[in-house]
Amino acid sequence: MILFRKLGLTIVLLSCHSVAFSQTHENRIEPISSALRAREFDKAVELSRSALRESPNNAQLWTLQGIALASKGDSKEALAAFQQALNISPNSIAALAGAAQIEYQAGNRDAVSLLNRLLQLRPGDPTGHAMLAVLEYRQGNCAAATPHFEKAGELLDSQLDALHAYATCLVKFKRLDDAVTVFQRAVALHPDDRQERNLLASIQLMVHKPQDALATLGPLLEASNPRADTLELASNAYEDSGDTPQAVSTLRQALLLDPRNVSLYLDFANISFAHESFQVGIDVITEGLTLQPNADDLYLARGVLYAQLAQYDKAEADFERAYELNPNQSLSSAAQGLVAVQANDLDHALRSVQSKLARNPNDPLLLYLQADVLSQKGADPGTPEFQLAMRSAKKAVALQPTLAPARAVLAKMYMQTGEYQAAIDQCRKALISDPKDQTAVYRLIQALRKTGQKGEIPDLLKRLAQLREQATKEERERYRYKLIEEDTPPRPPVQP
Amino acid sequence: MTFTRRTFVRLSLGSAISLTATAERLLAQGVSTHTAKPLPRQAPSGRPFNAHFVDVASAAGLHAPVIYGGVESKKYILEATGCGCAFLDYDNDGWMDIFLLSGTRLEGAPVDASNRLYKNNRDGTFTDVTEKAGLRAADWASAVCIGDYNNDGFEDIFCTYYGQNVLYRNNGDGTFSDATKAAGLLNEQPRWGAGCSFLDYNRDGNLDLFVSNYVRFSFEHAPVPGENNNCNWKGIPVECGPRGLPTGRHSLYRNNGDGTFTDVSRQAGIAQATQSYGMTVVAADLDEDGWPDIYVACDSTPSLLFMNNHDGTFREEGVLRGVALSDDGTEQAGMGVGIGDYDLDGHLDLFKTHFADDANVLYRNDGKGNFDDVTRTSRVGVETRYVCWGAGIVDLDNDGHPDLFLVTGNVYPEVERKLPQYANKTPRAVFRNLGNHTFEELIEAAGPGVADARCSRGCAFGDFDNDGDIDVLIVNLNEPPSLLRNDIRGKQNWIKVKLEGVKSNRSAIGAQVLAHYGGKTQAQTVLSQSSFYSCNDPRLHFGLGGLTSADLDVYWPNGLHENFKHLPANQLITLREGAGRVPSRGWSKT
């Protein structure tokens, strides 16, 4: 925040200057100001002390002393001087700015109240907004920071850290398009900053603009030594833009550069999974495990791929290993139950989930799975099993309100008990978490029909049809390519 | 701060769930996206099941195999979907004859490949009269529907094919003529006709025709096993589709009353449904407004329910009425459809069959054409092992409670070599109705004809030996058909109803009968197609249990309502529209 400091000082000087010249009769002010402008800070300090002995209640003199001390680097004394000024004149803009500046530089939370007071007096002050935004961001309060970032305007265009913080907050609030714009400003400010380019590309991928991401990454990819993380992002972008061969090739390049990077193997697993090339994915992850034998994520991913080939024993062994390596990983503890579900062994699935729940009774994923397995086992309303399923699902959504699949199970059970309004509520909440949830839309249609609330149904039918169409289109894109073993003669990809 | 897409997915979705959902979809690849776990089985009821099925096809003279594609593996989906069969009385002697479709092979049809018409010899055997009847044909046949389209008193046959569908007009002398061109039913281009059904959608007394189409297929452009992700099943290269192949277009042909038809698909609102792989078609008045509606089981896409607007048009309401998708809103691999009244509430329910790893679904009709999925509560969901095809809601043991029957068979014969749990030949299954809205699955307990493992497709229900119970004719791919004779035990009563239209179409297709017995009401309707691509005995059969009579309400397609009281059990009742009871043909074996 170096520039904020400079700008802050400028504000203070200008403020004092104007204040000084508004009181021309104070002939003690001008020499101090002159010394400050001449950067003769020791002299300014001496002059101010002398003047203050005669006029100890002069806020301007305290302020000038504060500026001189701050300029010398004596922040503690400077802050004391500004505080004296504020005691005398609480609305002194110069003193507020000076004090806020020092508190801000020290990362002190007290700067917030000073800046808020300053902004009450000067609502449009971009520096005040910028500093306040950064302070709020540092406190993890993006909700408070974001409006101030917005009001800081173009001032941020010279502040990489501030732009970075601003964009991060926007991502947090899922304002991804806005985040792209801010990261673009960051990249424009520092075109050679690899991290900012990577971040911009990441967000561009999130907003499904893979070609933009590739353009962003272009300078880094054209460099003589692109890094693995950049190549990983480029691979994601190629895959998203439908160029799977290039995605795989780029990912392999990244793996050569960074063969111990677990994330790269997981990316490979994802591509293999999406293109139903399960064995290829298993082979690559197995290679990764030779270098990273304790990577629980790799076992988890390989287990998922084994399950797709109906090799449930191997899948379960991998999930067990993942769980041993990281018992706190909710996913691996749930995976064993999931594979048992996939193998149609619901009793085994239930045992597995319940054993894990005994250790983690508040794991929403496990609670959801317990409800789902019980429901799939055909628990009838009124039975203890049904009641347990209902309790589990309710607890799961209480613990994790965004867990849409748990809401789907809950809605299903409400439909079974004839509590259609409650089912409607769950469907609506599920759709807030995932607007593309076809199950929620379908159940909502059925529940509304049951309750005679038909007005909304035509739009929901259209929405369901659109979601299905979109899903089909996405699937078609995903199915365009299949990864093949390298020793298999290559065939051109075929459009189904 | 480092973002990757995967990180965000994992953080925001709890990936395992989405991953598993995706995995289930991927595992299904070219077929349906929906899977269901089998419900736990209840303890056996211990109640005796009086129906007992024995395959008598060979003894009955049904020796010719139903040729259909490769035996060990299939290159194209065209080889896999198979075909249907029909019980019909083509010579009006009162005995059910048999019509069996057949296919061909990629390398060309074997010499003896043909659709076959078997005349009932009234002694438990049949005579192959295919050549004499002029019905020899060896091509990629799909479905058959039966109806007297020209109201001349003889049942005609419509067959769908890959390429060109064919209308066989019954000449009334034991022969048939290809009337396709004369009727105006020639395609401009080859199409893959799938399900079909005669129906009188405009209630003018002439049978119109609905034809579903499966996929737009051509050998030139069809991908081959393993070529893309729609050509793999559980990691094994298999024939491709239907997903990934272009969807078919369904057609409605209006009968002009002069032996010709006009394609009214567009103006009737049928042509607008473009995103479905249509299979079996059933036409019945599902909302009980007196006008026939059309239900199309669709593979891997939402099934379609065309509701009749009474003005020559239809509106598609499958999703709204709860019969398009699974209970979680996912498309299923709809193959066959049984239609009947399982819960004896006087309304027609639907039973739709699906692919392996999914449950067949039972839909309960509220009488207004709104359906509830009762698969779980009825315990039909205990079975998910097989690829299921032909099906019916039929009272097999004459206890007055309609049971469910289905046939099965894989579409990937090569898969069992790597995954033995997915056998190519699999048994049939009976779900006996326990009378409390639940069913109990029986396989061995229903007789060797049910337990017999075959790769089956269509099946038709009818009483071929006129002994007062329901027998089953089954198409087995690349093998002779099965004819399951029902050797029913005990003294359960029944009544059988044959309807003859006068103002309504002569076949009385679309007529609905409510049988009242023992304080219960069972609905049945005369159908031109159901099961899988097949046509049942048009005589409606009601088991009565220990009761000795029944009352009937008959709702004729043209709107006439008649009722008949105290009809004695254990006989065929023939009713002519507006004329009441008339003598039945051919019931006596003499």
Image (tube, coloured by chain):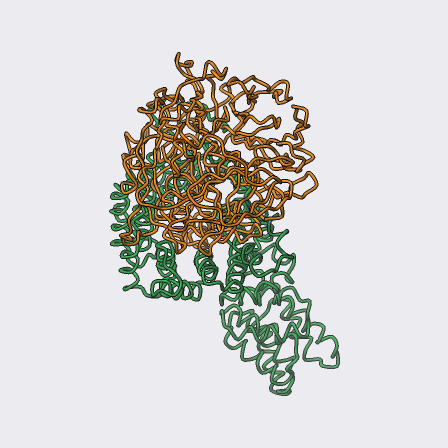
Q: Could you say which is closer to the camera, residue A70 or residue B259?
A: B259
- Regarding residue A189, the answer to whether it shows in the image is no
* B509 versus A199 height, above or below: above
Q: Could you say which is closer to the camera, residue B521 or residue A244?
A: B521
* A56 versus B314 height, above or below: below
Q: How many marks?
A: 0
**Left or right: where does residue B531 sit relative to residue A92?**
left
Q: Could you say which is closer to the camera, residue A478 or residue A206?
A: A478
Q: Position of residue B29 (x, y in %)?
A: 42, 36
Task: Identify the hue of chain B.
Answer: orange
**Left or right: where does residue A175 sit relative to residue A398?**
right
**Left or right: where does residue A420 sit relative to residue B422?**
right
Q: Dividing the image into 4 quarters, which one contains the N terminus of chain A?
A: bottom right
Residue depicted at 62% across the width and 18% down the height:
B181
* B286 versus A481 height, above or below: below
Q: Position of residue A405 (x, y in %)?
A: 44, 55
Q: Residue lying furthest top in this view? A: B111
Q: Could you say which is closer to the camera, residue B461 or residue A215?
A: B461
- Regarding residue B182, the answer to whether it shows in the image is yes
Q: Position of residue B579 (x, y in %)?
A: 60, 39
Q: Position of residue B93 (x, y in %)?
A: 48, 26
Q: Tell me where residue A23 sits by quadrant.
A: bottom right
Task: Identify the hue of chain A.
Answer: green
